[in-house]
Image (cartoon, grey):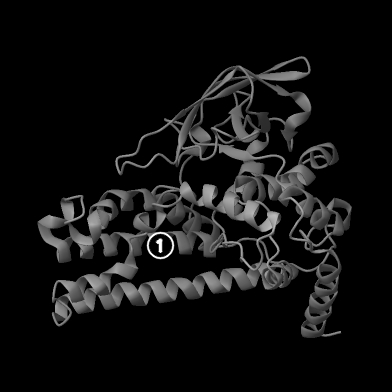
Amino acid sequence: MTSVATQKSVQAECALWLSENWNPELSLREWRELLVDSGWAVPQWPSQWMGKGLPAWSEKVISTELHRVGAPGLPTGVGMSLAAPTILEHGTDDLKSRFLRSTLTGEFSWCQLFSEPGAGSDLAGLSAKAVRDGEEWIVNGQKVWNTSAHHADYGILLARTDSSAAKHHGITYFVMPMKQDGVLVRPLKQMNYHSSFNEVFMTDARIPAENVVGDANAGWTVALATLAHERRFGNIVSRPKVVTGGRAVQEALHEYTEYMETYKWYPQRAGRVDLLVPQLTEQELNEDPIHRQRVAQILAMQKVSGWTADRARTARELGHPPGAEGSVGKLAMSEIARLASMEHGRIAGAMGMLNGADTPVNGMVAEVLISVPGQSIAGGTDEIQHNILGERILGLPREPQ
């Protein structure tokens, strides 16, 4: 059977199941439990773990079918994008049994506890420590830039468990319960006036011994898998399609709105390329050859970056693991954001530093100028991405550890 015919048969089978089972009057949790138990929630996962063992392209096929009928899909956030795929790849059967299904249904929410004040891009330099105490690990330390930590049930945590080992060794990957007395979460106020992140303080926080992902002192390998998923190019959250007034759809819309509130300033972080041409026109600079050339260059780079994202998505649909496209795409987005920010500044002039209703794009230019530096830091700095490409793709000598 050809690939096209296989995709058609999968699409037809899923469409039939949806016609018999999609009920918008169910609660969102009830609908997701039904979807998960059917195997259609994660068809590319093994059948042992709530999937159907289908090729990676099936994810897109099923997503299209769900959107066609207006049925919500899986939860958004760290749980599905980072925690679940990492546990599926490296967790024990016990971890998979305890965490995967409840993550798919949205019962469990997650956050990522990797970065520290002194260990961001140099993640392996982390200093949070975990010490074994019988059937538990006791954790002390601080994490930072933690989205959703204020409401998460669990966090994927990296902590040092062997201080005598080399930097990239002696690190263990944990699933840590967040709702305990030893965990304090505080919001961070950003210079662009948003508050999307938290800092987390752990004081004698406790983690069950069976919540280690992978092997103790070998968490760096597991962390690399998570980082590869984090850098997956083009991981976009779609707004639920409203075709009914049913409970499941309305609850999904509420979930989506709350989730996107955290990221509402991310378009500014990416440079707001979409505002460049309107700004040129408004300032009557659209005939200026220098401005036109700069904006054309940025638009061209954005188009090429989109093609890279398309290649990455196609590779995933064919079942290939995340590759260099993630780092290439990350570098491209950083460069586009910087160039767009500089051009916004040139177009707006001194007015670009002001905030308010009577300023360029209601203060949006000012927000772009102070948000864009975050683009080349989050998810691994540009320097880290250059190292990844140089060492793993081009085969250049490794940087001294």
**Residue 303 occupies quadrant:** bottom left
Residue 379 makes an appearance in the image: no
What kind of element bears circle 1?
helix
Q: Residue at x 65, y 37 (%)?
A: 219
Q: Is residue 109 left or right of residue 271?
A: right
Q: Position of residue 60 (x, y in %)?
A: 69, 70
Question: Which residue is disc 1 drawn over?
Answer: 333
Q: Residue at x 69, y 20 (%)?
A: 137
Image position, residue 229 (x, y; %): 61, 53
Picture coordinates of residue 340 (x, y %)? 28, 64
Q: Quadrant of the N terminus?
A: bottom right
Amino acid on which disc 1 is placed? Met
Q: Is residue 252 left or right of residue 55?
A: left
Of 291 and 134, the residue lying toward us: 291
Q: Is residue 126 among the parts visible in the rendering?
A: yes
Farthest right residue in view: 48
What percent of the width, then of the height, locates residue 377?
A: 39, 47
The reply, left or right, for residue 243 in relation to residue 364 is right
When asked about the image quadrant of residue 24, the answer is bottom right
Q: Is residue 62 above or below residue 263?
A: below
Residue 41 sits above or below residue 319 on the image? above
Residue pictured at 49% horizontal, 49% vertical:
398
Q: Is residue 205 above or below residue 397?
A: above
Question: Quarter of the image holding residue 197?
Answer: top left
